Every structure is written in C-alpha cells, then in structure tokens.
Amino acid sequence: MTNIEKVKQEITEIQKINMEAEQELNTLYEERRSYQDRLLQTESKINITERKISELKRNCFDKSRTLDVLVKDKAAKERDAKIRAAIQNEPTFDDMLQKELNTWFQEVQELWHNREIDVDPAIIFARYENKIRDAEIPSRETAIHHEAETRYKQIITDIVSRELDGNKIDYLERRSLKLPVRWFLDNQHIKQTLEI
C-alpha cells in the first residue's frame, strides 16, 4: 500500500468516523428536540397543575370563609334564641308599667294617708290599654309608647345578653328597667291621656 492509498484509506476511515459522529450528532439533536418537546409538555402540565392547585386553594378558602359565616350565623341565631327565651321569663313593658303604677299609687296613699284618693292603678292601666297600646290610629302618644317600649326592649336585651355571657348584673342595673317606664309616665302627653 502506497502512501496515497494509505492516505485515501485514512481519509475514508476519517470520513466514516465523521459520518458516524454526524449520525450521533443528529441523533443527539433529535433527542434534544424530543426532550425540549417533552420539557414544553411538562412545563405546560406543570402550569396547568399549578393553576388547578391555585383554583382548589381559592375554592377551599372561599368554602372555609362560607363555613365560618355559617358557623357564626348559627351561633348568633342560637344566641338570639337563648336571649329571646330568657326574655320570655323577664317582665314585659306592660308588667313594669303596672308595677310602677301600683308603686306610685302606694306612695301617693302613704303621702296622702288622710285623704281619700279616687285614682285606681287598674283604671289608669285600662286607659293605657285602650287609648295608647291598642289604639288603632297612630298618635303622638303611640309614638311615645313605641319609643319607650323600644328602649325597654334594648335594656332588657342588653341585661339578658350580658347575663348569658356570664356577667353578674347587680340590683342597680336591673333597676334601669324602670327608666323607660318612668320616662313614659313622666311625659306630659301621656299624663294628659291617662288623666294622671
């Protein structure tokens, strides 16, 4: 083998090795393209899964917020029911009014023990029922009554709710139930209507 042939053979071997290397390079390019496609698909799947997780977390948060609202509403309704049940055992505005009229009548009798008093608390209470409480036509007196009764309900609700919370209500706070009744009886229009 001559040098030329030898060089030709070396060139052929180099070309053969080059061809194999190019084939391997093409295979590697193809694998890279395949891996890039797989990477893009994987990235896409990751993005979709992340969005899905984010949506699930948002839904979970919304549901937990809804649950919190429902639990609070239920607790508030149960508390309101307890308050209403406890208020049923408390004296009403009319009970306090009758009691206050009887107390007022006893005080007047004690102060004027030598004189005969022609005022009966039952008559005054009957006037109250007929002219104010059960009046069909709204008037200034019914508005005053409504305001006094609303104040009374606010006070009794406050007292009962504080008792349910475990607070001790003393005698003076309980006496505050009389304030709306006295305010009602001290009003000039009410005095004229009840003829006190």
Image (cartoon, helix red, strand yellow):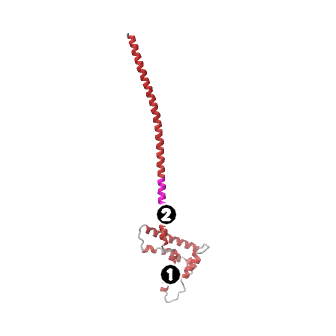
Provide residue 147's location: percent of width, then percent of height.
Answer: 54, 71
Residue at screen point 47% across, 46% down: 54
| Horizontal side of residue 50 vs 126, given as left or right | left
Residue farthest toward the top in the current orientation of the protein: 2
Where the C terminus falls, by quadrant?
Answer: bottom right
Question: Residue 168 lies in what quarter of the image?
Answer: bottom left
Q: Secondary structure at mark 2?
A: helix
Q: Position of residue 53 (x, y in %)?
A: 46, 46
Is 76 contained in the magenta span? yes
The front one of 31 and 118 is 31
Badge 2, how many Cα within 10 Å: few under 14, some, many 20+?
Answer: few
The residue at 53%/72% (across/down) is: 149
Q: Nearer the viewer, residue 18 or 172?
A: 18
Q: Nearer the viewer, residue 154 or 18?
A: 18
Q: Name the residue beneath numbered marker 2.
A: 77
Residue depicted at 47% across the width and 43% down the height: 49
Q: Residue 9: give x, y in percent of width and height.
A: 40, 14
Q: Looking at the image, which residue is at 46% across and 32% down?
A: 34
Q: Quadrant of residue 174?
A: bottom left
Mark 2 vs 1, N-terminal side: 2
User: Where in the figure is residue 12, as x and y percent of width and height?
Assistant: 41, 16
Q: Give the residue furthest to the front.
A: 1
Residue 196 seen: no
In the image, what residue type sits under mark 1?
Asn
Query: How far apart are the two marked residues, 2 and 1, measured between alpha carbons?
Result: 37 Å
Quick check: marks 2 and 1 in contact, CB under 8 Å?
no
Magenta stretch bounds? 63-80
Residue 102's label in the rendered image is 1
